[in-house]
Image (cartoon, helix red, strand yellow):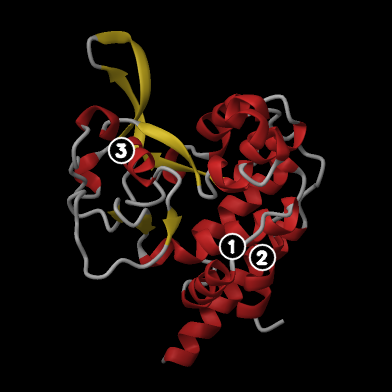
Amino acid sequence: MLTSLHTVVSMRLAVGLVALLCLSPVAAEPPSSFASAKKILAADLYRSEQRITFYCGCRFDEQPVPDKPDRTRLTPDAESCGLQPRKNANRAARIEWEHVVPAWEFGHQLQCWQEGGRKACQKDTRFRQMEADLYNLVPAVGELNGDRSNFRFGMIPGEPRAYGACDFEVDFKQRVAEPAEQVRGDIARTYFYMEDRYGLRLSRKQRQLFEAWSRQDPVDQTELQRARRIAVIQGHRNPFVDADVRQAAGH
């Protein structure tokens, strides 16, 4: 039974990969800034059934802003995922676009950051490309985005749940965030992509953790479809998603 299931999954992933490889590499211009990337994410990349937050799996959609009925914002459906605010209910009620590899982390490896932080790097072409790269941006509940800050990913002893049923832990003292098992491979392949594409430097400890996460959480259809849509917009693929799919398909 397990062998048959593995065969079915492999066949489905292989079909998805064929579709991915057939995409035109010049179908759209990539975003030129973080601001333009956020517009593309909201309007084109995450629509209808794709509107699920990355860490908590909450559905989200456009909703009126309280006390401002003429305005809307992307808002998580807390009941869809059992989300509860830890401390900041206002920020927990909105969607923000999270850098999986924080801007602080890749920015610190550029000279512009040493000369004036993120503000100085806004004039740096390479930083702007990294900041706007859609592969590194995911929809997150605002409070989680704020709590994660620029903390590294890692494992936290026990399962302290501060956000209701959302499987996401933060150790503020150790500056570590632990995501749910089903997105750990996605995170790992994003880090490997940023390393390959922009020369991001990973520590030995990071590499060991992400290699393990990538093995334990292989590419699923959600990750593959997202990568396919981004490839159309940016004109290039994440080779680590492709490689994982090929391995699952037995190629």
Q: Quadrant of residue 70?
A: top left
Amino acid on which disc 1 is placed = Arg
Instruction: Give the residue at x 61% y 43%.
Output: 108
Q: Residues within 10 Å of mark 1 (few under 14, many from 20)?
A: many
**Which numbered disc flags the more N-terminal residue, 3 or 1?**
3
Q: What mark, if any, has residue 240 been given in the picture?
A: 2
Q: Are marks 3 and 2 in contact (CB under 8 Å)?
A: no
Percent x, y for residue 76?
Answer: 30, 37
Query: Residue 188 at x, y = what percent?
Result: 54, 64
Question: Dot 3, crowdedness within 10 Å: few (<14), some or many (≥20)?
Answer: many
Q: Which residue is rendered at x = 68% and y = 31% of the image?
A: 31
Examine the image and state in which quarter residue 233 appears. top right
Q: Separation of disc 2 and disc 1 at Cα? A: 6 Å
**Depicted 39 relative to depicted 245: above or below:** above
Q: Secondary structure at mark 3?
A: helix
Look at the picture and state if 212 lies above or below 186. Answer: below
Measured in 3D between alpha carbons, the distance from the residue under mark 3 to the one under mark 1, in whole angstroms, is: 24 Å
What residue is shown with label 3? 143
Side of 84 where 34 appears, left or right = right
Between disc 3 and disc 2, the foreground one is: 3
Count every numbered label the image shows and give the total: 3
Q: Residue at x 28, y 10 (%)?
A: 69
For the C terminus, the quadrant is bottom right
Label 1 sits on residue: 189
Disc 2 residue type (three-letter): Phe
Disc 1 element: helix
Q: Position of residue 219 (x, y in %)?
A: 54, 67
Given the image, on which type of amino acid does mark 3 rest? Glu
- CB of mark 2 within 8 Å of CB of mark 1? yes
